Image: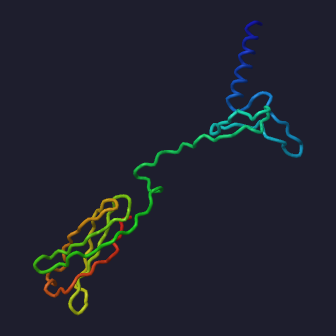
Amino acid sequence: MHTRGRRLRFTAVLALTVLTLTGFSTGRHHSHSRHGSSGGGGGCSSSSQDHDTSTSSGGSTSGSTHRSRPTYRSTPTATSSATARPLKDGTAVLKRCASVEDPYSTVEVRNPNGREALFTVKVTYKAGNGSTLADTTSQVSVPANGRATLRMAAAGTGALDRLDHCEVDPRATADR
């Protein structure tokens, strides 16, 4: 009989501890009327809540506060693109047009993004009468908020003797 009393007392203390840790306490429950609830109190606690048991002066529960614990989410990985902002297109400026002596055009590409990006650049080679001799595209990696110089080989080097001028697409397309 003596052991049974200790078990009962241990069970009561354990139950009170569990109730205290989960946000319930003795003497602080409010009764609920049949037509709705009057006041707060009682209720269930979840593992994502933290109940502050402090009260305002006078011992009423109207001054108690409720704070939520931060929600823990998985850390995004490098392969996750859901949170990454889409890249903005860069700008391309022709610095030098190809010629028979040097069959490369030089283009400067600027990156407006806060991270390194790969850009596609297009150069069009025009004859004196305005007709297109060739188009070439090339890609260049540009550092965050920086610029890079790209040398592009002219397509159809046989047409270089008829080349009058080069035109660069001012929009360097960001590789999405």
Q: Residue 105: percent from the left, percent from the top?
A: 20, 75
Between 176 and 1, the one lying in front of the other is 176
Q: Quadrant of residue 168?
A: bottom left
Q: Which residue ends up furthest to the right in the rendered image?
A: 34
The residue sitting at 32% across, 63% down in the picture is: 118
Q: Report the residue that reaches farthest toward the front.
A: 57
Q: Is residue 53 above or below residue 82?
A: above
Locate residue 65, reporting x and y percent. Answer: 70, 39
Total numbered circles: 0
Residue 143 or 82: which is nearer the viewer? 143
Write the residue at 44% across / 53% down.
Answer: 80
The x, y position of residue 78, in whole percent, is: 40, 51
Q: Is residue 130 left or right of residue 90?
A: left
- Considering every residue shown, the one lying at the far top of the view is 2
Name the side, left or right, on which 91 lies relative to 132: right
Judge from the rendering whether residue 24 lies leftward or rightward of residue 171; answer left or right. right
Task: Answer left or right for 173 relative to 1.
Answer: left
Residue at figure coordinates x 20%, y 78% from the top left: 97
Residue 25 point in image, percent of width and height: 75, 29
Q: Which residue is more in the foreground, 9 or 117?
A: 117
